[in-house]
Amino acid sequence: MHEEIKPNAIYTTSEVEQLLKISKSTMKRLLKSGLIKANKVGRQYRILGKEILKLVSPEVEKKAIKSYLSVKKRVIHTLNE
């Protein structure tokens, strides 16, 4: 059973881990790197559904690939000099 991610709903990190089927350590990396934006309430994070949808959308993947290829090109250029 797949649960629909509602754009305006607020999720806890545990709920996001279950929705995306990721581990706690992966969730921490996503938060620390800024790939998922969250608000801290007390000692816990709250994540807006829109942030989860951005992460899993094809557009985000396209941007990541474009960014990776750009960095790869610069590294190759630097190594060849």
Image (cartoon, rainbow, N blue to C red):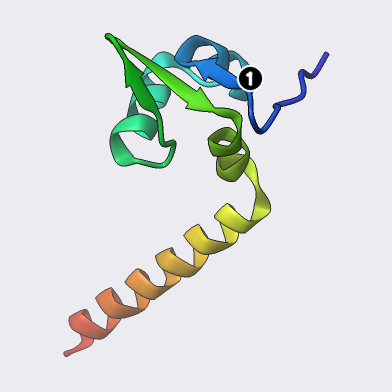
- 44, above or below 30, in the image: above
Seen from the viewer's position, the closer of residues 5 and 2 is 5
In the rendered image, the quadrant that contains the C terminus is: bottom left
Seen from the viewer's position, the closer of residues 42 and 31 is 42
Position in image of residue 5 (x %, y %): 70, 26
Seen from the viewer's position, the closer of residues 48 and 62 is 48
Q: Which residue is mark 1?
A: 19
Q: Quadrant of residue 69?
A: bottom left
> Outermost residue toward the right?
1
Q: Residue at x 59, y 37 (%)?
A: 50
Left or right: 21, with 27 as reference point: right
- 31, above or below 11, in the image: below
> Outermost residue toward the bottom?
81
Q: Secondary structure at mark 1?
A: helix
- 78, above or below 44, in the image: below
| Amino acid marked by disc 1 | Leu
Q: Count the numbered circles shown.
A: 1
Disc 1: CA contacts within 10 A as few (<14), some (14-19) or many (>=20)? some
Q: Residue at x 66, y 33 (%)?
A: 7
Left or right: 67, with 33 as reference point: right
Q: Residue at x 44, y 36 (%)?
A: 36
Left or right: 71, with 53 as reference point: left
Q: Quadrant of residue 40?
A: top left
In the rendered image, the quadrant that contains the N terminus is: top right
Position in image of residue 46 (x %, y %): 44, 19
Position in image of residue 54 (x %, y %): 58, 44
Left or right: 65, with 38 as reference point: right
Q: Residue at x 56, y 12 (%)?
A: 15
Seen from the viewer's position, the closer of residues 58 and 38 is 38
Position in image of residue 73 (x %, y %): 36, 78
- 14, above or below 61, in the image: above
> Outermost residue toward the left?
81
